[in-house]
Amino acid sequence: MQSKIPFGRRLIKDIKRFGGAYIMVIPVVVFYILFHYKPLLGAVIAFKNYQPRKGIWGSSWVGFKHFESFFNSYYFGRLIRNTLTISLSGLIFTFPCAIIFALLINEVKSRAFKRTVQTISYMPHFISLVVVCSMITLFVSSDGFIVQIMQFFGSGVNQSLLNMNSAFVPIYVLSDIWQQTGWNCIIYLAALAAIDTELYEAARIDGANRWQQTIHVTLPGIAQTVTLLLILRVGSLMSVGHEKIILLYNDYTMETADVISSYVYRRGLIKGDYSFSAAVGLFNSAINFALVILANRISNKVNGYGIW
Amino acid sequence: MSQSESTVKKSTLRQEGRGYQVFTVFNTIFLIIATFVTLYPMYYVVVASISDADELARNFGLLLYPLGKWNVFAYELVFRNKLVVSGFMNTFFVLFVGLAFNMTFTCLGAYFLSLKGSILVRPLSLLILFTMYFSGGIVPVYMNIRELGLMDSLWSLIIPGAISTYNMLIMRSAFAAVPDALYEAAYLDGAPHYKILTQVYVPLTGATLAVMVLYYGVGHWNAWFNASLYISNTKKYPLQLVLRQILLLNQNQDLNASVTDLGELAKYTDLVKYALIVVSCAPILLLYPFLQKFFAKGVMVGALKG
């Protein structure tokens, strides 16, 4: 849509036509400048040696020093490994659960039973993370019922599972499955409901049994939804949210629990090492951004449309 | 038509193989078990909170019913805690004022982005979309809040989160789905834009607006992280941060003050935790049946954004 009229004149015409709307959008623009673009600019401290009394712009430049020292530090490998382990575990275990759950619910004939199962299944989604993590802490403590059941079956555990490096990822993933499966399956159920019933009729007339109908009608019917959500997951492969990690980890489990975002939080906001942790955060943001772009490309190729 | 369809279904049902019948039985059993597993942790918390403290401490393994004499002593202790009460007040403040900001800002932004024909829509959308995928990270965000003088104020939990870009895009789609003819008619009648928004768009997108209130509302109710960064005065702590203090960091000054005997204290620590969990979840779970019809719709509006 190339136009020969200069932009300035078009803008004036536009303002005349949408004047009221321009005024209405001002608070929104101010919001984005103040709370999104200003901190984005503030991220330059990653390339500086930030000193509070000199301020962001008065502090001296140090180039990529902080990035280099992060790449060379002991933490670098560990953080990447833990971040990938947790997000890949989510991809392998949490992600398929919702699909399977939706397929099983879809086979239920009784409406009342279906609704009951669904209603209960997405209840945990609305419980706050603080409460979920508190429940985990209580249940897996040395006298919590989960540890007691393990002891009953002959396990020698006599401490909180949250103090064990090997248990952190399973706890994280299993609690995610408990909390999110019901909610995540709604979208698949909608996709399943949208499948044309005539396709099933046709398959039946062709002599397909239930199992063959699932393979040849149901699965292709939700394939597009699955691919799209899978690609979105790839886009966030290097970002594991800090909130749940911070609520669950402790000094004993740093080896497996500490991820990039929790490290940035601890190093930056607890210890006050602003420049260094801003550099780590920026590094993480850049990778995430690249992954999203990549995911969008893949989506365009596979589905014919992008994420945005 | 529908009758013949249902007879077709019935007859094919009878034709289903034996394998499918076996599957149906196992599927039903599996789903019942899955439902119980989902419910049990919540059930455990409720039952434990009204159990007798001594019996609860002696119990080994699962809990099926309240142990000993039912009592609500733990709940008394919870409400005797001033921090819990102030936490509720602070959260209610952030919830209601926050929602007013959320809805106003979100609708204003969504309205502009849904305009057809304005040359600024596309550049503005791109600038807004960019913030969804690239951020400076939590450190610069934290420093920004400090620079703006929002530290230790409940406004730090309201204003910086006034717009969730994702929600605004959902709202934009809803506005864009309103027939153009209605916009044109109002515009030609000389209605100013704010009136088109409030009297044409808002009444026509009630269901999506309700979903937005639900999303933002649950977000406010459950938020704790920003408060842990920005708020240091415990009297200004929102509920979730109070919960974190008591449930995860084991700091419960008021309980320490009201129960003096150290043995007694240890006895009630866990009981109070269970009661507190119930109290904090009660408002959302009480609203749950009423909100339920919006859930499926909520996920769908999110999905259709694309």
Image (cartoon, coloured by chain):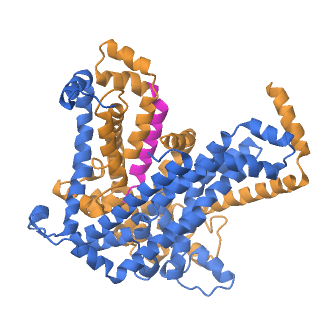
Chain colours: A blue, B orange
What stretch of residues is rendered in magenta? B204-224
Q: Residue furthest bottom?
A: A156
Predominant SS of the magenta segment: helix
Expressed as whole percent of the image width and height from the top left, the position of residue B158 reads 30, 48
Residue in the picture at 21% in, 53% down: A38
Residue found at x 85% / y 28%: B4
Q: Quadrant of residue A281?
A: bottom left
Task: Give the percent coordinates (x, y) of residue B255.
Answer: 39, 69
Give the camera-side residue of B143 and B124.
B124
Residue B76's quadrant in the figure? Answer: bottom left
- The residue most toward the top is B189
Q: Magenta includes B205?
A: yes
* Quarter of the rendering occupied by the N terminus of chain B: top right
Query: Where is residue A264 drawn, in percent x and y?
Result: 32, 70
Residue at 40% from the left image edge and 26% from the top image edge: B201
Above or below for B306 versus B76: above
Judged left or right of residue A215, residue B223 is: left
Residue A146 lies, with reference to residue B205, above or below; the image says below
Give me the residue at 58% from left, 85% from top: A157
Q: Is residue B250 in sight in this rendering?
A: yes
Q: Which residue is nearer to you in this view: A21 or A200?
A: A200
Of residues A253 and B88, which is closer to you in this image?
A253
Could you say where residue B191 lies in the image, as x and y percent from the top left?
30, 16
Residue A139 shows in this picture: no
- Residue B59: say if magenta: no
